[in-house]
Image (cartoon, coloured by chain):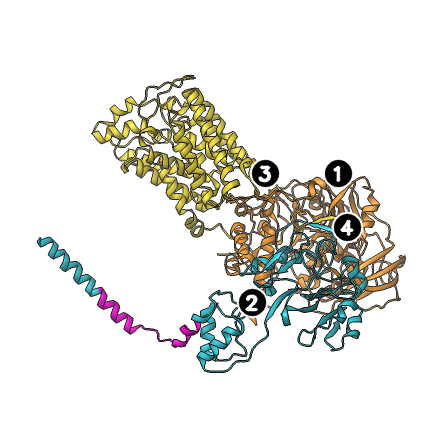
Chain colours: A cyan, B yellow, C orange
Amino acid sequence: MNEIIYAFIALGSVALLFATLIFFVDKKFKVVEDPRIDEIQEILPGANCGGCGYPGCRGFAEAIVKTNDFDKLFCPVGGNEIAKKAASIMGVEVKEKLPQIAVVRCNGSITNAPKKSIYEGATSCAFANYLYAGESGCPNGCLGLGDCVVSCTFDAILINPNSGLPEVIEEKCTSCGACIKACPRNIIELRNKGPKNKRIYVNCINKEKGAIARKNCNVACIGCGKCVKICPHEAITLNDNLAYINYEKCKLCRKCVTECPTSAIVEINFPPRKTEIKNTNEIEA
Amino acid sequence: MSTYVLSGSPHIHEQQDVKKIMWGVVYALIPALLVSIYFFGLPALFITLVAIVSCLLFEYLIQKYIFKSNEITITDGSAVITGLLLAFNVPSSLPWWQMVIGSLVAIGVAKMTFGGLGKNPFNPALVGRVFLLISFPVEMTTWPKVIPLNTSFADVITGPTSLGIVKEGLMKGESLTKLLNNVPSYTDMFIGNIGGSLGEVSAIAILIGGIYMLYKKIITWHIPVSYILSVFIFTGVLWLINPEKYADPVFHILAGGLMLGAVFMATDMVTSPVNYKAQLIFGLGCGILTVLIRIWGAYPEGVSFAILIMNAATPLLNIMFKPKRFGGK
Amino acid sequence: MSGLKTFSIGGVHPHECKFTAKKAIVTIPLPERVYIPISQSLGAPSVPIVNKGERVKTGQLIAKGEAFISANIHSSVTGIVEKIDDWIDSSGYKKKAIIIKTENDEWEEGIIISNEIKKDITLSKEEIISKIKEKGIVGLGGATFPTHVKISIPQGKKAEYLIINGVECEPFLTSDHQLMLEKAEQILVGIQILMKALDVDKAIIGIEENKPDAIEKLTNLSKNYKGIEVQGLKLKYPQGAEKQLIKALVNREVPSGKLPIEVGCVVQNVGTAYAVYEAIQFNKPLIERVVTLSGFGVEGGNFLVRIGTPIQALIDYCGNKHLEIEKIINGGPMMGKSLVSTEVPVTKGTSGILLFTKEYSHRTKIYNCIRCGKCVSACPMGLEPIVLEKAVEISNWDLAEKYHVLDCIECGSCHYICPAGRPLLDMIRLGKNKVNQIIRTRGN
């Protein structure tokens, strides 16, 4: 019996000693943090994708509380909803941003841009880009080795095995920007999702002269400028033999789509045209 | 215009590949296999075949139905090596169903759960062997006596191994000199005319295999030499201190599974360090642990445990001991 | 000459494949057109100073090296400048090139055409350096570093040895070997010129043991030249790499991240020494070089080719119509670049063209890394490619930097020896690229 009492006292006093120690250490080294950081972190998606440019959702929450600048801080995954909630915690108003989506601006599929060489090497677009122009010969086109796929933390971009090109899954894309950074040729761009997800863009970023571009890929932008002339909203500019549609100015009238002689301009999520059965210009499936 | 192949340099390659290395190890194991079949007869051949077939089967089944992978790698020879080495680590009288379980543990647990070839931290054959030793201690420590070219599967007379004789005797307090009269001669231990696991009995067969692997550049000398040398020196020092209590170093090298372990198991590329400095330390560590277990540990043979413990230390050794860098400190 | 020397860390032994050894240098006829890229050396591209339609003579200056590290480029034929346009080159991309339609072979005034061996060196050190710059001489070993920059020693450093690289450790290539046999005396004079420019009195020519005739010839001739000695080297790849050559010859290790001048050495290829000789003694700019054409089962040889000649012209000259070529390599098989088309021209850095048929063109099967450590024992810089590959795979650039990925000389020994066929050098190159990018942004 005595042994039990002694053991009880011995271990009990050790436990009490440590408990007191921990209590005082906790008091002395307590980190005082603004409680709003925790509040904001609660409402954030918790994906820790880095799309905001900060290290994880905690980092973003800290940045909001520190700077309170909602113009520069935006969580692409959470979108406008999260921005409104976070702004109300901080006690400020915030402007709504238009939703965006990653757009792959290359249509150099296996059929459009046939292979003129065989690549054997590390499965890395960055390395193939260093090695040479690519299997199709186009120095700006997609290499199809999947650096963008590897970088996406939301499984929103996959290489279509039939075309060899990456395809963005609309429902999953959070416009975090990881694939944009991963692509060594800057083929992917963030563009406005558009009303009812409709959007129009030039599906090419080749900057070579028209004739040379056409030799490598038959849906390349040849820099003819017809789209620039026909656009009633001055949304299209031509630089370095390449047309570019400004998504802020584009009103989705589709005039440029039919005008383009090489079908380089594509329209997404539009109903089929009533008049003629023109080339639909959908991305090759 | 023709279609050319584009790749980064270099554009030529050494002829040796993983398949050639693995099958090279299998060829190096053939002398030991032949010797074991000679000394232990058909049961030895049978249990070896059971081991190889079950290793191949489990690798195939796991890759096809559990991983659902497109690539089945049973032809690269690594499963055959695991099967052979596992068989070499057991007595020829082991029941076949226990061998199948051992193969499942070796391939399934020690190799496949980590991702297959090249990803396992522990030597699969040794994991299988230790599992069998702990699960079926009686069958794993029943050593049939040598019956050259035995063709029957009937129960045979069994007896302890050389290490077993010495350890048990010393624990009972008998004199070492008297004990050493009961163990087989050095010649017998060199050729393999002794009781023990299938592959560990014949030092000469293992040596031939080892020399073949060195010639084919499958292994380098660093691990086997540092392992055997450290055992030799450690036991030598002990023997010089008290020849009545500690057996001489030549006995320690020839007895038990040291030769098999040093040449075939410790040199397994996947589980041993990658640069020569770390490899020498790895061999040294294995040697010290082997002697510690043999002399002061509970088991008469310490090679399997020593190697497994050092396998755990391999990542640390890789970081601690770096190769000499050109133009740097 | 003492016994054979070598470097101590790493190295591999590919088959020598010197099928074109002992084939005398043949001058191939002028091509129909030459495509002269404006970027043929390390550093900034040169600036064209001729226009479309202009008539140029052989040896005339057509592009100026304006940046600090950059070289002059001269026309290699006489003809009309057809256009200055993009043309495919060995980088795999189209780059700006001056395209000249060949009409003739009229040499610029001042250039002396002669076969006599001129031994007297009349120019001063500064005049030599400025003339080398004027004549557009770059390193012909493959790195194409502008020679006048290399031999202008920066303040605070002193050159002690001039090391001449006659190693040619890459399999198949024999152009340097043949040059050493046919132009030995000229090379020695070229070396003397370089010694004068560098202010050194010791030069060592390193030659691998598989060229005993070159070793013997140069050893005998160098007896008449003060300060030049010949040293035989054991056969091991990459003996011809700058740092390994310095280690073998004078037993000094160039510190990580630094240049050879740090240990008092300047390394030049034998071809560069010959080009320097021609430039100083005959006012000849760099407009042609010796190129080896080879491969398994290929009718080849060593050819004197004008810069800008399309590779197709060289292949046609040799025949080989029966061969189905699947891979073309610019340079040696260990470090050369595979080409996407035979329209790529020969440039100052082209030491060899290799034609590979189907059985030699494809990479070996890839297995999981079996941690054999052969890459670690093969690396001549003492690095650990096994870790570097893993670091690049998981994009851990800090780890790659910590394991000294920037020290890699891209020799390819690790990839060559890897039994699992893993694309080690591809990944390491990627790592170097990314780490350099990160360091540049860090600096900003």
Question: What subunit carries mark 2?
Answer: A
User: Which corner quadrant of the image does residue A240 belong to?
Assistant: bottom right
Q: Which residue is mark 4?
A: C290
**Disc 1 from disc 2: Cα separation:** 54 Å
Mark 2 residue type: Cys
User: Which corner quadrant of the image does residue B271 belong to?
Assistant: top left
Can you see residue C407?
yes
**Disc 1 from disc 4: Cα separation:** 21 Å
Q: Which mark is residue A176?
A: 2
**A136 and C387: which is toward the camera:** A136
Q: Which mark is residue B16?
A: 3
Magenta: main secondary structure? helix
- For label 2, the SS is loop
- For label 3, the SS is loop
Q: Residue at x 53, y 45 (%)?
A: C369
Q: Of discs 2 and 4, which sits in the foreground?
A: 2
Mark 1 residue type: Gly
Give the x, y percent position of residue A176.
56, 67
- In contact (CB < 8 Å): disc 3 and disc 4: no
C328 lies above or below A12: above
Q: Which mark is residue C297?
A: 1
Mark 4 residue type: Val
Q: Of discs 2 and 3, which sits in the foreground?
A: 2
Q: Residue at x 81, y 58 (%)?
A: C35
* The residue positioned farthest toward the right in the image shown: C103
